[in-house]
Amino acid sequence: MTIVLGAIADDFTGATDLANNLVRSGMRCLQVIGVPGPELEVSDVDAVVVALKSRSCPTDEAVVDSLAALAWLQAQGARQCFFKYCSTFDSTERGNIGPVADALLERLGAEQTVMVPAFPVNGRTVYQGHLFVGDRLLNDSGMQHHPLTPMTDADLVRVLARQTPHPVGLAARPVLAQGAEATRQHLADLAGQGVRHVICDTLDERDLDVLAEACVSLPLVTGGSGLGQALPAQYRRLGWLAEIAEPGRLQPSSGGKLVLSGSCSRATLGQVAHFLERYPGFALDPLALAESDAQWEAALDFARNALERGGPVLVYASADPERVKAAQARLGVERAGQLVERALGQLARTLVSEGVGRLVVAGGETSGAVVSALGIETLRIGEQIDPGVPWTQAQLEEREVPLSLALKSGNFGNIDFFTRAFEVLP
Ligand SMILES: Nc1ncnc2c1ncn2[C@@H]1O[C@H](COP(=O)(O)OP(=O)(O)O)[C@@H](O)[C@H]1O
Ligand SMILES: O=C(O)[C@@H](O)C(=O)COP(=O)(O)O
């Protein structure tokens, strides 16, 4: 059997977000960490999401890794490929969204792709090519302070044009309102003019359905997880996908409850504050981490004590923009991030080996670091906690039962996410 959809995600929480929407729309889906070997068995799934750490890495590396993922997905017979990036279009002047999309298009021999970052249920919409988070433009949403990919321009046609030598076009709402056929025709007209990338407006789920129908036959689609919510219905319509009774179900969870947060996004800062009003937490500071191991060891002791008392416990580096900027000014952006990621990754490894079995991680890069430190290769997708964030499970050698893991995108989740996550876990 071959897979219907092969996805390449530029970070780990983004991969889980997409996998979650595919499962909820009726696809059996496996998330793999990095490009797997040829031996991985995927005969019992309809979609595979390859999670890369290619959002903020050097562009050449992102392109090489994405092409390797594409080759693996093509070998599994994927009928359509999906390049998943952030619903807030997280990228820099160099990329990596434009260069990766260009490389994938070229390898697939395709002329055009759509860019659909919207995720309306989480407040990400696009109008006249401008990305909104709730009622704010992207550059006024908090994303302008992101530690690695500050987003200071909401006009996605303009943002993408800085990342690709090819023409960028727009499929605006008035076209979508005329339906899938009109949208398909508009894409074809733009292709005729040599437009390779089309930023797509999206106000709501109906627009996603129109876009999914218009682009289901494209070799490559790109975007946030919202499009992933709408595509499976089109695959069923074309007879590519059967009705699946229960695509996502996990085993009962067990073990200590730990939250690790390296996200400095607005939503996470609120969730950290909410958690600290109820349960213990330990704050990491990159400046102290740079000096010695003393703070890391103190965090480990603190977490062990709290876990012995039944947990949950939080270890976090999450800080407001002023504190992040101060640390970055002293250490550099990259080093500050790496110190935090390494500290949280090592804490995860130590504490999971000592019995933590239910782990919530906040932040995309942070999740990448933690999942890599734990040596996780594949994730099964289970129940959704909040839109975009499901519980997942990974089988680790040292544990008899799987590790339950929730990878939370920085800006996702309600204010009580860190406490409620454990309450909804079977
Ligand atoms: N106090 C801090 N100072 C500087 N950088 C930090 C701090 N806390 C976390 N970071 C770094 O900021 C980045 C946050 O990115 P990420 O984990 O992707 O979160 P999000 O999902 O919110 O974007 C990570 O590289 C993390 O290590
Ligand atoms: O599309 C989204 O918003 C998420 O899936 C995502 O990629 C978020 O990234 P992080 O905020 O870095 O976790």
Image (cartoon, rainbow, N blue to C red):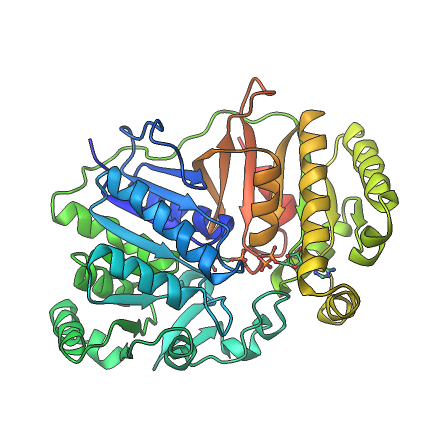
Q: Nearer the viewer, residue 283 or 111?
A: 111
Q: How many labels does the image show?
A: 0
Q: Who's the residue at 30% across and 76% down the image? A: 166
Q: In which quarter of the image is residue 313?
A: top right
Residue 43 image offset from top left, x and y in percent: 27, 28
Q: Which residue is drawn at 63% across and 52% down?
A: 416
Between 120 and 396, the one nearer to me in the picture:
396
The residue sitting at 17% across, 74% down in the picture is 191
Whether residue 118 appears in this view of the structure is no
- Residue drawn at point x = 27 percent, y = 67 percent: 114
- Going by the image, does 354 lie left or right of 174? right
- Please state the horizontal and vertical placement of residue 163, each as a whole percent of the image: 41, 73
Q: Is residue 98 above or below residue 189?
A: above
Residue reaching furthest to the top: 400
Q: Is residue 417 visible?
A: yes
Measured as percent of width and height from the top left, residue 332 is found at 72, 65
Image vertical order of residue 157 relative to residue 75, above or below? below
Q: Is residue 327 rendered to the left or right of residue 126?
A: right
Q: Is residue 262 left or right of residue 285?
A: left
Tell me where residue 152 sits by quadrant: bottom right
Residue 210, by quadrant, is bottom left
**Residue 113: percent from the left, percent from the top?**
25, 65
Of the 4 image quadrants, the one containing the N terminus is top left
